[in-house]
Image (cartoon, grey):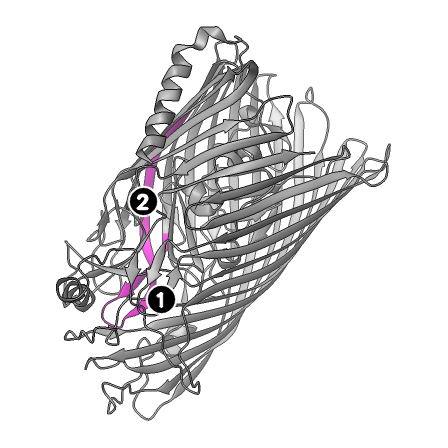
Amino acid sequence: MKLLATTSALALTVGLAAAPLWAQDSGLETIIVTALRRSENLQTAPVAITALSGASMQSNRILTMEDLGRSVTGVNFTATSPQAQEINIRGVTNTRLTAPTADQSVSTFLDDVYVGRSGTMNASFFDLERVEVIRGPQGVLLGKNVAGGAINVISAPAQFENSGRITGTIGNYSLHQGEGYVTGGLTEALAARLSFQVIDRGGYAKDLQHGVDLEDLQSTQVRGTLRYEPADTGFRANLIVSFSREDSNGPNRVPVHSPNNLPGPNLDPWTQARNQIISRFYPKLNVRESYPTWPTFAGESSPTPQETFRRSWSEVLKLEKDISDITLTSITGYRQGRANTFYDQSGIGPTNPYGVTVAALFAEPVYFQEKIFQFSEEVRASSNYGADSRVDWILGGFYLRSHVTQFNRYWGESLGLPTLSGQSNWYDPGTTKSYAGFGQLGFKITPELKITGGIRYTRDEKNGTQTGVAVSRAGRFDPTDTASLTPLALPVGTNSFTAPYGKNWSKATPQGTISYTPNEDLMVYGTISVGFKGGGFQNSAPNAFAASTPYNPESVTNYEAGYKWELLDKTLRWNSAAFYMKYRDLQVQQTSGACLCNIINNASSATIKGFETEVQYSPMSWLQLAGALSYVSPKYAQFVDTNGQNNTGNILQRTPQWQYSLSGDVSMSVLGLPDALHLRLAYKHQSRMPWSPDNFNWEPGFGLLDGRVSFSPQDKPWAISFWARNITNKLYRTSIIPIFGAEISSYGAPQTWGADLSIKF
């Protein structure tokens, strides 16, 4: 792969040196976004947005939320488990909030429909029109829980012109992937599109105890779209139906000794056990190999293997009708899904092939099962007066009902530590209802100066019943243990608790924006906005009191100023924003070493300030350069957690202060074929970041380099490409759990490479 990196870099250098040989056409493409519920030019939307086209995402293999996080500056991705993906925008993230009533701090929308559960949104991206990354709270138009920002994923629409494409991919780790689409008109008013993606890939890691791959993937997705537009009626209808399934042998967890131990016991039994295996049996053991425990749950006759699987089905119906100068819109969304995640939290336990035992060594595999049903409806009326009008407005209403049923099982065996043997189960069905009304009015004081104000009122209703059961208390190494398996904390003689819970929250979230457009190349804006995220209840609670005690909503006020500027005859685009956010009751979840349980706290307050800048430069048609830089200073203004740890002044967890990215795209003529060879290199770097609010555990800064070489003659229906991700094979982590002196770690994807063959028809 060093050869590939060297070749790509050399090709880019040659392309730059030979620039005068090719056409001098220049300019950047116009990008249309819908983040503000209207179709508008990215350069005129007074909000910080990064938009990626579906074509660029496919060519650069941005297939997942993790890929998106490692590609877009100011965005970060971590994942405590496959069922809990955590998107961080400007220091705001929904860390480990997976309860049935929990909401995301950074919201995800799929075809303008809010997706309440991140665990059913992990499927790979395919056949998209674009993805919009919206930074900062958008409490008026986007609505539901857009406190830190939003990811808006837009599927490719059906077209009346017949076309199609099929792409096949092979790569290392036994990657076999196929995807494609076909679209065209069925009648003069009706068009359809059918898309698919299939992925079969071996694992990035290995379970040595059972001889199976970990972090493998088998995925199938299908999407069908119908577009109905009868002529001269002003009516438009789009129906999108999609299905996805994913299967895997689960994640790889590896203990790493913590260089900065937390106060309290620093036993670190897992790293000690691995070190014994390395010194006595297996000196070549690396972080891509582990020994996860497969437990035999109570009432079952055989061990349960690690696994991850997801199934989801969604339907979106969007209706639009133009009546004079008004557009009426209805967006109906239905989503159901099922996600199972079972994995060993530590990656090694008392039962291992070498019989290695260390004082205090224990295993605690967890099994999370989730079923979701979600229905939402949004109706809007918006003005459609034209570009010369001094007034525009939007009025609307929103309703969401989500029912989530969780069944969680914890199983443990311990070499003598109390409360760490046996089995505990939780059953937790929870329901969320959300109602909202919103409105926004814009007025041009002059043709160049515009003010826009809006407000949204949201009411959340959440309720459910949680039951915790001590199924068994003892294990093979401590058959006389009488304590319940943590985090269940039941007195001896008590086997279960049942706790109903429920509460309502409401909030009005205003937003005001002023924008100034002195000419068609420059727009300057300032905005004040308020975001709101409802409260909720702890899952897998230790007792009835904890299960029925809510944590509070969080709210944020954002002050932001920015500009969007095109220069040099629109060959240079420079967009920047500076912001200051003030949080109240920020929801924070941590792992407590005292009870080995997760505790959700409300940080009293936090402040986040920073800036972002993005530059694109395309002086000639064969050359595109891009760079971005973001700085975030996020601090807890006041936060003493339930363990008594004073985190005031600490940096918000999982937030790198600095991020930057650079990329270059070159097209050149070869073999007499114009613009047939395309070269790309892209690099993103982030500074070090703390994993938890106490700032004891840190991830060092790192950078990732990706590259691609494509050959696609303009007069041919085919193209072939060679690509590589993480070319330098950088080792980095996507999650840690600090406990007893260890950092139980999950690692990002290693170096991957492969080839694509695409055929258009």
Residue 758 in percent (x, y) is at 59, 36
| Residue 611 belongs to the span the image colors magenta | yes
Where is mark 2, residue-wise? 655
Q: Residue at x 20, y 76 (%)?
A: 355
Q: Considering the image in quadrants, where does the C terminus appear?
A: top right
Q: In the picture shown, does residue 122 fall above or below 384?
A: below
| Residue 400 belongs to the span the image colors magenta | no
* Pick the front one: 652 or 421: 421
Q: Considering the image in quadrants, where does the N terminus appear?
A: top left
Where is mark 1, residue-wise? 211
Quarter of the figure with residue 675: top right
Q: Residue at x 19, y 62 (%)?
A: 282
Q: Residue at x 41, y 50 (%)?
A: 173
Q: CA distance from mark 2 to mark 1?
A: 36 Å
| Helix, strand or loop for the magenta stretch, by majority | strand
Residue type, label 2:
Thr
Q: Residue furthest top?
A: 20
Q: Residue at x 52, y 13 (%)?
A: 570
Q: Left or right: 530 with respect to 494?
A: right
